[in-house]
Image (cartoon, rainbow, N blue to C red):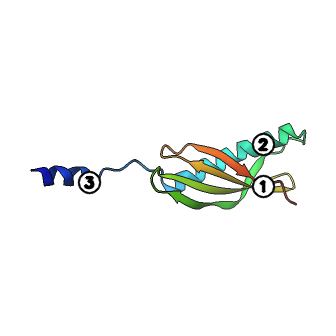
Amino acid sequence: MISSLLLGFSHLTLAECSDIDAKLSADSAAQVYVNGLAATNRVAAQSAVTFKRALIIKKHLPSKRKEVASYIEAGNLYYTVYSLVNSQCIASTIKSTNGKH
């Protein structure tokens, strides 16, 4: 009885955001972040777009969070923005590079 009860609960895990959804969420958060950088630096507002597919750098096993690198182009500058994506596919920016030509 107890063994069947334990087997029933052994496969329960936290829901995890899929890799594709994590990349899309991180890319959209990175575009918003880079557009905000342009506004604070008083640079002409230009639409930020991805120039390379996002990469999942690391998967944090206990918390099911993923660290994702997004590659964003705004004007003539290129940025790499790192985000943490939680199990509900909500991305939060943790760091970014300075814009490079």
Tag in front: 2 or 3: 3
Q: Of helix, strand and loop, which one carries label 2?
A: helix
Rendered image quadrant of residue 66 = bottom right
Q: Of helix, strand and loop, which one carries label 1?
A: loop
Q: What residue is pinned by disc 1?
A: 97
Q: Is 51 in front, or is 99?
A: 99
Q: Is 84 in front, or is 29?
A: 84
Mark 2 vs mark 3: which is more N-terminal? 3
Mark 1 vs mark 2: which is more N-terminal? 2
Q: What residue type is labelled 1?
A: Thr
Per the model, the C-alpha gap separating discs 2 and 3 is 45 Å
65 sits to left or right of 30: left
Q: Where is residue 33 in the image (x, y as percent from the top left)?
A: 73, 43
Q: Position of residue 83 (x, y in %)?
A: 64, 50
Q: What residue is pinned by disc 3?
A: 10
Q: What residue type is labelled 2?
A: Asn
Q: Which residue is drawn at 62% across and 43% down?
A: 92
Q: Position of residue 90 (x, y in %)?
A: 56, 42
Q: Of helix, strand and loop, which one carries label 3?
A: helix
Q: How crowded is mark 2: few (under 14 residues within 10 Å), some or many (20 or more)?
A: some
Mark 3 vs mark 1: which is more N-terminal? 3
Q: Are marks 2 and 3 in contact (CB under 8 Å)?
A: no
Q: Residues within 10 Å of mark 1 (few under 14, many from 20)?
A: few
Tag in front: 1 or 2: 1
Q: Are marks 1 and 2 in contact (CB under 8 Å)?
A: no
Q: Position of residue 76 (x, y in %)?
A: 87, 55
Q: Residue at x 88, y 41 (%)?
A: 41
Per the model, the C-alpha gap separating discs 1 and 2 is 14 Å
Q: Which amino acid does label 3 sit on?
A: Ser
93 sits to left or right of 44: left
Residue 2 — which label?
Answer: none
Q: What residue is pinned by disc 2?
A: 35
